[in-house]
Amino acid sequence: MGGGSCGGFPLTTPGLVLVTGATGNIGRCVVDRLIGAGQRVRAMTRNPRTAHLTAGAEVVYGDFERPQTWPDVLDGVERVYQFPFPCVGTDSGFVGAAARAGVRRFVVHSAAAAGFAPGDDPGDQTLSALRRHLAEERNAHRELELMVEATVVEWTHVRPGLLAANALGWAERIRTERVVREPYGTAGYPWVHEADVAEVAVAALLTDAHVGAAHTITGPAKVSQAEQVRAIAEAIGEEIRFEELSPQQAREHWLRDGCPQEYLDWRIELLAASLDGTGALPPTNTFQHVTGHPARTFTQWAKDHAGDFRPPTTTMADTV
Ligand SMILES: NC(=O)c1ccc[n+]([C@@H]2O[C@H](COP(=O)([O-])OP(=O)(O)OC[C@H]3O[C@@H](n4cnc5c(N)ncnc54)[C@H](OP(=O)(O)O)[C@@H]3O)[C@@H](O)[C@H]2O)c1
């Protein structure tokens, strides 16, 4: 046993921890926090040269779609932060290979939908697009969780609600036009900061307090889309226009952006579902319960990401 604690629980000082999806919104925070806790970390990516991960992490090339890359990735690993890539949970997939290589604990990057009651068939065309989408998400994430449960004794599922990082989808238009165009300005969700998801994941990797638990993590309260845009505007110190589209205008707008029809249908329904309340994914207080402190707000997220929404600075060299 090593010294120190995490969320009030003693650290168990594991051997090598592998972070998959290490360059993603959440994975990057997991790597940072593990390194900050003095943990030995291996970070998997398909592009080690451009990964720009925290100094101290051992960055290795690995691809979920190329099993020949897995032995080097998994060599000597004791615990894994498992990104939910579609094929990792199959019998001959990454999870099985990891267990055979000696991995003893998985912390699964899952989704709140995995906690929904089973029942809806994602292929049932009589259901609404949102119900089909949530059933598909539920099944995919729950399948991975069940594969992990059947494979190792020590597991934790970290199930984020809707990520605040989805707002990065607005970044280009904010940078170039200072505008966000969406239907239903008052619709919103308790967007969860990726740092909160990572904090829970790290507690599950470094202490024994969360073995066998499934944690659904959300932001502290519903934040509407119009409020999100105001928070980003304040964070960058610039005005951003929120242009409310009718659902039909939104469809046409997103189709022009190349979004698939199915996606438009469920996304409009997801927003509409939250107009009068908290919608399909209401807030939980799990983060506070697990860590002992309040979940980060969307205002905090916007401040942390102000640089993503500012136009690139023009230097003298660009102008001559
Ligand atoms: N959006 C939401 O609101 C929401 C809510 C709940 C759960 N989720 C789940 O969270 C996931 C997104 O998490 P995130 O935002 O942290 O990730 P992200 O920023 O989308 O990053 C994707 C990661 O996947 C890795 N990756 C992609 N293809 C790979 C492959 N073939 N082999 C190995 N790694 C591969 C990428 O690594 P490299 O490119 O470096 O290889 C990257 O690190 C979603 O896929 C969803 O399942 C999303």
Image (cartoon, helix red, strand yellow):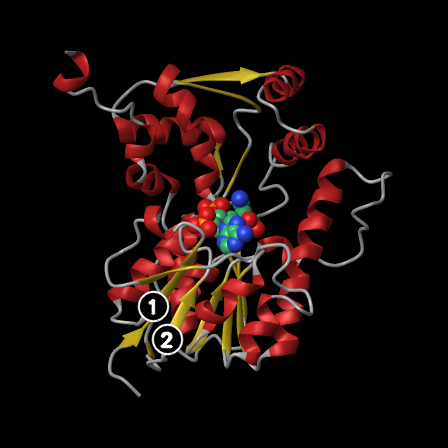
Picture layout, residue 85 above or below residue 213: above
Quadrant (top left, top right, bottom left, bottom right) of the C terminus: top left
Residue 214: percent from the left, percent from the top?
Answer: 56, 67
Q: Label 1, on which residue? A: 41
Kindly identify the residue that appears in the image at 30 percent across and 63 percent down: 57
Q: Label 2, on which residue? A: 16
Q: Secondary structure at mark 2?
A: strand
Q: Count residues near mark 2 (Cα–Cα under 10 Å), then give few for <14, some for 14-19, many for 20+.
A: some
Gap between marks 1 and 2 measured at Cα:
6 Å
Q: Count residues near mark 1 (Cα–Cα under 10 Å), then give few for <14, some for 14-19, many for 20+.
A: many
Picture layout, residue 191 above or below residue 115: above
The answer to whether mark 1 is within 8 Å of ligand 1 is no
Kindly identify the residue that appears in the image at 33 percent across and 49 percent down: 49
- Residue 47 located left or right of residue 155: left
Whether residue 34 can be seen here: yes
- Residue 138 located left or right of residue 195: right
Residue 18 vs residue 152, the one in the foreground: 18
- Residue 16 located left or right of residue 103: left
Amino acid type, residue under disc 1 in the picture:
Val
Quadrant (top left, top right, bottom left, bottom right) of the N terminus: bottom left
Amino acid type, residue under disc 2 in the picture:
Leu
Whether residue 219 can be seen here: no
Marks 1,2: beta carbons within 8 A: yes
Kindly identify the residue that appears in the image at 62 percent across and 41 percent down: 279
Residue 165 vs residue 220, the one in the foreground: 165
- Residue 198 located left or right of residue 119: left
> Image quadrant of residue 204?
bottom left
Q: Is tag 1's residue or tag 2's residue first in the polypeptide sequence? A: 2
Q: Secondary structure at mark 1?
A: strand
